[in-house]
Image (cartoon, helix red, strand yellow):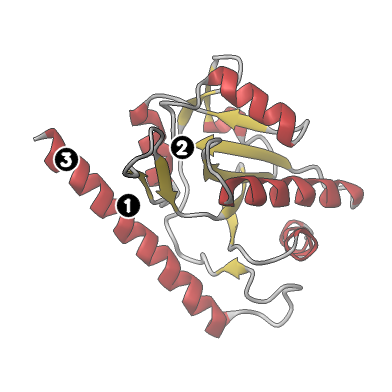
């Protein structure tokens, strides 16, 4: 029964990931010419992406999404053992925060693990210290992580590699711009920090 439930969860997340990709494709046909970086942001109008979560921060304290997202925030779901994608994407997010700070925009970077078995609070603390002084890194129980990932339509799955003692995690990779009002934008990979920061500034500037 447990195996069937896990299969259903994986299939549901995969379906949600496909929906997100489809929405991103539609953006190519509906984007505004006024955006500084056409194509970087997915069209999220009318989507149900985002929602409340309860997780655990670097000090082991349980925190809610309302406490974490007190102002403009960049969210990224990944894991610290990731060999390539996550470090690059989180560095991009950190660079965006610095560029936005130069424009007088205070944006908080938040990293949420999808690998709580290895990413405990101590590991999250080390990760935040390495990546950015303003970064908050969150972990939690398997159920808490699954709820947060489901809210943001994040796909993830553990992958065992033959002959290797450590496993990897397949997962979707987007940067989410959120604030207390909800989701403001979702950014795809393949753009520079300068391009993405310009779009975030466009979104946040009245």
The one nearer the camera, 10 or 102, is 10
- Cα–Cα span, label 2 and label 1: 17 Å
Q: Is residue 147 left or right of residue 73?
A: left
Between disc 3 and disc 2, the foreground one is 3
Between disc 2 and disc 1, the foreground one is 1
Q: Is residue 127 left or right of residue 103?
A: left
Q: Please provide percent x and percent y for residue 105.
A: 83, 48
Quadrant of the image for the C terminus? Answer: bottom right
* Image: 10 above or below 71: below
Q: Is residue 117 left or right of residue 194?
A: left
Packing grade of label 1 (10 A; few <14, some 14-19, many >=20) is: many
The one nearer the camera, 12 or 105, is 12
Q: Please provide percent x and percent y for residue 131.
A: 72, 36
* Image: 103 above or below 59: below
Give the residue at x 19% y 46%. 7
Tell me the SS state at disc 1.
Answer: helix
**Label 2–label 1 contact, CB within 8 A:** no
Q: Is residue 106 left or right of residue 131?
A: right
Q: Please provide percent x and percent y for residue 122.
A: 58, 17
In the rendered structure, which disc, 2 or 1, sits on the residue that comes first in sequence? Answer: 1
Tell me the SS state at disc 2.
Answer: loop
- Cα–Cα span, label 3 and label 2: 23 Å
In the rendered structure, which disc, 3 or 2, sits on the residue that comes first in sequence? Answer: 3
Q: Which residue is mark 3?
A: 5
Quadrant of the image for the N terminus? Answer: top left
Q: Which residue is mark 1?
A: 13
Q: Which residue is mark 2?
A: 52
């Amino acid at each position: 029964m447990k195996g069937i439930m896990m299969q259903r969860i994986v299939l549901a997340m995969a379906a949600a990931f496909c929906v997100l990709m489809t929405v991103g494709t539609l953006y190519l046909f509906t984007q505004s010419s006024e955006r500084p970086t056409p194509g970087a942001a997915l069209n999220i109008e009318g989507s149900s992406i985002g929602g409340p979560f309860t997780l655990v921060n670097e000090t082991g304290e349980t925190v809610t999404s309302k406490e974490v997202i007190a102002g403009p925030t960049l969210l990224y779901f990944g894991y610290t053992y990731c060999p390539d994608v996550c470090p690059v994407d989180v560095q991009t997010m950190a660079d965006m925060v610095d560029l936005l700070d130069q424009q007088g925009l205070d944006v908080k970077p938040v990293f949420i693990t999808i690998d709580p078995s290895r990413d405990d609070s101590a590991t999250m603390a080390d990760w935040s210290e390495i990546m950015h002084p303003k970064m908050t890194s969150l972990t939690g129980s398997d159920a808490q992580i699954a709820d947060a990932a489901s809210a943001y339509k994040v796909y993830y799955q553990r992958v065992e590699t033959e002959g290797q003692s450590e496993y990897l995690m397949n997962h979707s990779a987007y940067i989410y711009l959120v604030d207390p009002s909800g989701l403001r934008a979702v950014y795809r990979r393949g753009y520079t920090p300068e391009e993405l920061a310009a779009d975030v500034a466009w979104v946040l500037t009245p």
